[in-house]
Image (cartoon, helix red, strand yellow):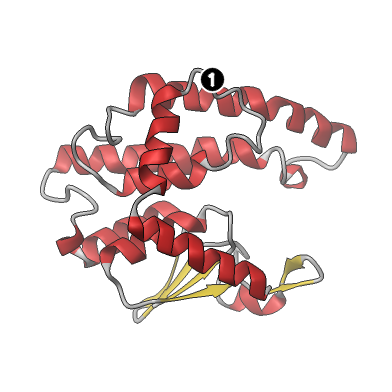
Amino acid sequence: MILYTVPGSCSFASHIALEMAGAEYEARLAPREGGRTAASFFEVNPKGRVPALVTDEGVLTETPAILCFIAQTHPHAMLAPMENPWLFARVQSFCAYLCATVHVAHAHGHRGYRWANEDSSFQDMTRKVPQTMGDCFGLIEHEMLQGPWVLGETFSICDIYLLAIARWLEGDKVDTTALINVLEHRERMLVLPEVQRVLAQEQKLAQSA
């Protein structure tokens, strides 16, 4: 498999999942030209975004789908409780929240052009990001993160995805003083050997850009 990625982006989650699954894969930097997504990448993913996972059956996009695919095709890694319909539904619910709500809140600070045309609108959206991201992570802190992992004692792709998004907190100027569980979870994830290997791979990809 080939994973198209951009260091620091949400594709970090798919990269970690592949590493934890022991999958045979190659991580490639999504091509760019003049600071923009290269035309050649749209042939891989017409959306022009990462992650994009090239498989024998075709190209998969969207982080929740890729994470579930990796977990299902590598069951020995036990990245999702697929034998328990209720828990697996909770996994999908959490990943959907990160994708459809939290990531969108973050994107308003850097991708305002997706929703508006005026500079004043971009500035207003950027100012709002610390609040909206703070609210999202407040909900995760108090209602969703069971501890030590998102599902409690069961590690899953939820934890991988949460790490990828939680790396953006400081850059989004979120007040993290009350996010005790979230920050402890992030530190717990960052020391895992698979995460360290992916971080090293991302650094090499970034240097090759």
Tell me where residue 41 appears, x and y as whole percent: 63, 75
At x 53%, y 20%, the residue is 177
- Judged left or right of residue 122, residue 30 is left
Q: Quadrant of the C terminus?
A: bottom right
Instruction: Tell me if mark 1 has few (under 14), some (14-19) or many (20+) residues whose alpha carbon lies within 10 angstroms of its own.
Output: few
> Is 13 above or below relative to 167?
below
Tell me where residue 165 appears, x and y as whole percent: 50, 43
Visible residue check, residue 15: no
Query: In terms of depth relative to the viewer, which is nearer, 101 or 160?
Result: 160
At x 15%, y 43%, the residue is 85
Identify the secondary structure beneath mark 1. loop
- Judged left or right of residue 114, residue 48 is left
Residue under label 1: 177
- Judged left or right of residue 157, residue 9 is right
Mark 1 is on which residue type?
A: Thr
In the rendered image, the residue lying farthest to the right is: 119
Q: How many numbered badges does the structure rendering display?
A: 1
Tell me where residue 77 appears, x and y as whole percent: 20, 60
> Is 65 above or below relative to 188?
below
- Snapshot quadrant of residue 198: bottom left
At x 50%, y 58%, the residue is 11
Query: In terms of depth relative to the viewer, which is nearer, 180 or 162?
Result: 180
